[in-house]
Amino acid sequence: MNPSVLYLLPDLGDLLRLQPQYNAATLVELTRALPPGPPHAPHVLWLTGPDPDHPARDAFAAAGTEVSDLSPDWTWAHAEHDALKGFMKQYPQGQERLRRAAHAEQDLQALLGGPLTLESLTSARTQDGIRAYHAALQDALDEGPGTRWHARRLDTLARTLQDRTGVALAALDDLPDLLDRLPHAALPDPATFQPGEASRRRALADRALLLDEHDDLMALLGALEREPGDRVTPAAELRYAAANIHLAVGDLPAARTHLESAAHALTDERSLPGLVLARLGQVRDAQGERDLATRTYRAVLALTYAPQAARDAALAGLDAPFTLDLTPRP
């Protein structure tokens, strides 16, 4: 690994929560494996957008990884893109161009449809597929609002990174064009990296927090109870995940026991306190303890930081008591 290189880590956003071998903990492991390495403190340049609830933000914070946010806020470009689409839908020619753009999106989704790894994400097949996607999108909608000003945004970002080395987290679909603009940038070599225990533990927690109807709940609970936790996926989060499984099957006492245990185990986690307290408020509500539930919801809103999902749950709980609906989905 060359310390004079800027290594670009592929970012998947919320899709990190779905990948056993490429998740938020994998990013932490990668950052530690790349230069400058020990004894230097890990440091990441954040190039991937302003989402405060991005899963990697919690992971880097928990691991003690310093993050420098270099990504400007281009939300206005998304607004322009949406406005353009609304305008084009009114005309047959515009509708045809939107269909071509949608087809390009579908091709990209198909490319990323299976389990993802560092090897697959950095492969020529994936990088060429991303190039083809951007070319098709530009052909259909033209550079500008139609592409969310893709070229202009990357030109601006590349100028910021001209003299930067180390490790940067960049959106997967930005990587090919960033590599074209930055001669000193490179992708990590997958041959020198293997996801470790932190990735495995993170994958377990993510799986338990995103339950599927085909999941073996007892097996998941057993696995969660055997895990000791680590900095990226602490024991409190494993208990929180177990509580969600109990709640999913209507076992309120067990859910409450795990949530109260998780609350007592909290230390300095970034998002977890809000999530634990919001869920605990819901369980207390479902058990008929409205006053205690209300105080718990207010505790969520009093936190310095809580994920939007936790704040939404707390506000909804203050507005009306939470009730548990176990009606099977069709």
Image (tube, helix red, strand yellow):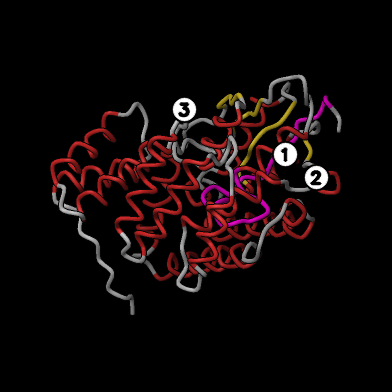
Q: Does the magenta stretch include residue 19?
A: yes
Percent position of residue 233, x then y: 55, 42
Whether tag 3 and tag 2 are in contact, CB under 8 A, the answer is no
Percent position of residue 168, x then y: 67, 33
Judging depth in this view, the residue of 162 and 283 nearest the camera is: 283
Whether tag 1 and tag 3 are in contact, CB under 8 A, the answer is no
Callout 3, which amino acid? Asp
Is 40 above or below relative to 317?
Answer: above
Q: Is mark 1 on a helix, strand or loop?
A: helix
- The Cα atoms of the two marked residues, 2 and 1, are separated by 7 Å
Callout 2, which amino acid? Phe
Judging by the rendered image, the residue that carries numbered circle 3 is: 268
**N-term-proximal mark, 1 vs 3:** 1
User: Which residue is painted at 64% across and 62% down in the image?
Assistant: 112
Query: Which quadrant does the C terminus fall into?
Result: bottom left
Judging depth in this view, the residue of 311 and 79 nearest the camera is: 311
Is 329 above or below relative to 183?
Answer: below
Residue stretch in magenta: 3-24
Judging by the rendered image, the residue that carries numbered circle 1 is: 30
